[in-house]
Image: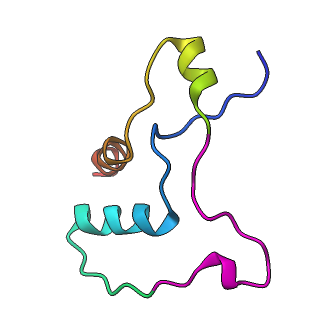
Amino acid sequence: MGLFNIGSSQVFSKEEIIVKFAEELGFPIKKKVISAKSLIVDRCLNCGLNTKKVENFLNIKMPTMQKVVKKILSCSH
């Protein structure tokens, strides 16, 4: 079986997921974008994982980022 990556069916940046949570919660946000490329320490540019293995094993499609955000917020209330 090996290692399974479990996540969204989409690749998104950390900025995109933060903005999506802020929008869903109705928080106004001021964007200040700083590229990870400009940092001294190497950082990932997105939060993407290949979920094909777990999708094939479980015979399901992983949810979209929007569905993940909504589910997390519905569980927290």
x 50%, y 49%: residue: 11
Residue furthest to the left in view is 26
x 79%, y 21%: residue: 2
x 32%, y 62%: residue: 20
Please give left or right for residue 65 compared with residue 11 in the image. Answer: left
x 47%, y 40%: residue: 8
Query: Image quadrant of residue 37?
Result: bottom right
Residue 36 in picture, x, y percent from top left: 64, 76
Residue 24 in picture, x, y percent from top left: 24, 61
Residue 5 in picture, x, y percent from top left: 64, 34
Main SS class of the magenta portion in the image: loop
Tell me how the rendering is colored: rainbow
The quadrant of the image that shows the N terminus is top right
Q: Is residue 42 magenta?
A: yes
Front in this rendered view, residue 41 or 69:
41
Please give left or right for residue 48 compared with residue 10 in the image. Answer: right
Front in this rendered view, residue 6 or 25:
6
Number of marks in picture: 0
Please give left or right for residue 70 compared with residue 13 in the image. Answer: left
Residue furthest to the front in view is 37
Residue 43 in picture, x, y percent from top left: 71, 69
Residue 4, placed above or below residue 44: above
Q: In the rendered structure, which segment of residues is drawn in magenta?
A: 33-49
